[in-house]
Amino acid sequence: MLKKILPWFIFILLAGLLVLLFIKKDDMDQYMSEMIVNQTPVEVKKSGQKAIDSLYNYTQNKRSYKMTFLGFGADNCVNCKRMKKVQKQIGEKYPHQVNIVCLNVLEPKNLKLMKTFGIATIPSQVLLNKKGEEFFRNSGYYGPEKLIKIIEKQLIADLKNK
């Protein structure tokens, strides 16, 4: 009797564990991001923030963009390729308002920004306002319709704050 029940019990236990992991995916990603940021040396954080200010703080560097769309991914990742298409759509819809930046996590030059933002999974998207401050983050695929709503909301908020 035990030989018949035990495999089913193990199967149900593993299935339940998979469901739990799927439900808690965002919490785990948030935890991992915080761990990366906490373990990043202060010099790297300062250097990363300096790079963000010089490249993506448009009030400081006088560029005309209203925000930045940072996309962290890799060339061999299926969902990253899907997100590149979304980034292209956003770039075409907001050519002079949203600066689209694709960062390949496999390139050592992007490691500093990955650590600064605590990127733990790919694809990850980070939206920065015109001051280079993060106002939205997502891990995994995120459709263009949802992103357009978030971008529109931020553009409207920027107009009200002028």
Image (cartoon, helix red, strand yellow):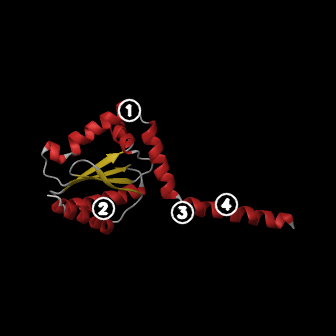
Which residue has dot 1 on it?
Answer: 42
Q: At which x and y percent is residue 92?
A: 20, 61
Q: Quarter-wise, where is residue 145 in the image?
A: bottom left
Query: Closer to the camera: disc 4 or disc 3?
Result: 3
Q: Earlier in the sequence, mark 4 or mark 2?
A: 4
Dot 1 falls on a residue whose secondary structure is: helix
Q: Is residue 145 above or below residue 110?
A: below
How far apart are labels 2 and 3 at the CA level? 25 Å
Q: Tell me, yes or no, whether the two marked residues, 3 and 1, touch with CB atoms within 8 Å.
A: no
Mark 3 or mark 2, which is nearer the start of the sequence? Answer: 3
Q: Name the residue tied to disc 4.
A: 14
Q: Residue furthest top?
A: 43
Q: Earlier in the sequence, mark 4 or mark 3?
A: 4
Q: Which mark is residue 88?
A: none
Discs 2/3, front: 3
Residue pointed to by mark 3: 23
Q: Which residue is mark 2?
A: 86
Q: Are marks 4 and 3 in contact (CB under 8 Å)?
A: no
* Outermost residue toward the front in this view: 161
